[in-house]
Amino acid sequence: MSEVSVPVTRARSGLQITTNKITNIQVRMASIEILVGGPYPEHPYGHTALRVTTLDKDKVYDYGRYGRTWGVGNSEGDGILNIWESFQAYIKEESTHKRITAGFVYEISEEQANAINEFYKNKIKNKNHLKSNPNYNSYLIDKYYALGPNCTTLSIAGAKIAIPSIDKDWKKYQEGRGLSTMEKGIVSLKSWPNYIFMPADLKAMLEASDKKSKKINTYK
């Protein structure tokens, strides 16, 4: 028995098999994993990153205040995007903080995954390349702000390329989980944004969403 491995779009458009043998057609599926990291004592807000897996690539897009910070409570800073080539290295780094990360896995097509990778590739185009090492590359892409753009908003922007409705219930879960009472008051004065921006709110939304993930991984 021969085997043909094809992306979803080619399978849908039809295949011509020129053989008199039985052919097993394997439709290739890629995936995204929305990685929602929990709080730890020095960092009560949590963290969000996006893992994109294709047939030959496994990348984690990890955006945050990894450089200079300023503003009230260091709410602003250099918006640095780390692109990890090793998921294990990324999750090991998160685990050093005693952080528990929930990974919401969704199957998508190879083409959708490539489009997400292209989205992030455009984010770093002509930007300042700060660091290279065997595990990741860092780029200064813009200014980070606690209400967005932040780690959650940029991760969801990538995920929505494949699953546009992933955040459709954001209004139900916009509670500012992880923020102190004083911080919630400051947000109210500035006006709450019209999108989900806190990792713990995102986690609550994904857990309850009718767009069910294929599985939820737990990393410690």
Image (cartoon, rainbow, N blue to C red):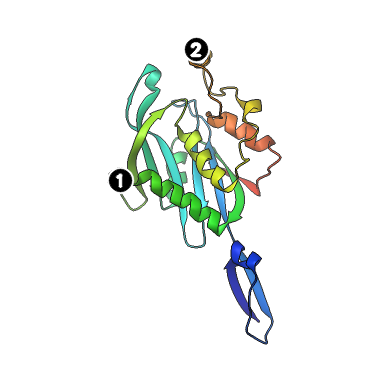
Earlier-in-chain disc, 2 versus 1: 1
Seen in the picture, residue 200 relative to 73 is either above or below; the reply is: below
Residue 82 picture quarter: top left
Image quadrant containing the N terminus = bottom right
**CB within 8 Å, label 2 to label 1:** no
Q: Name the amino acid type tagged 1.
A: Asn
Residue 66 picture quarter: top left
The answer to whether residue 184 is visible is: yes
Q: Name the amino acid type tagged 2.
A: Leu
Query: Residue 142, percent across and down?
Result: 35, 34
Residue drawn at (60%, 34%), measured in percent from left and top?
203
Q: Residues within 10 Å of mark 1 (few under 14, many from 20)?
A: few
Calculate the distance from the C-alpha at mark 2 to the C-alpha at mark 1.
36 Å
Nearer to us in this view, 58 or 160: 160
Query: Residue 9, percent across and down?
Result: 60, 62
Q: Secondary structure at mark 2?
A: helix
Which residue does the numbered mark 1 point to in the structure image? 126
Which residue does the numbered mark 2 point to in the structure image? 189
Nearer to us in this view, 85 or 122: 122
Residue drawn at (58%, 70%), measured in percent from left and top?
5
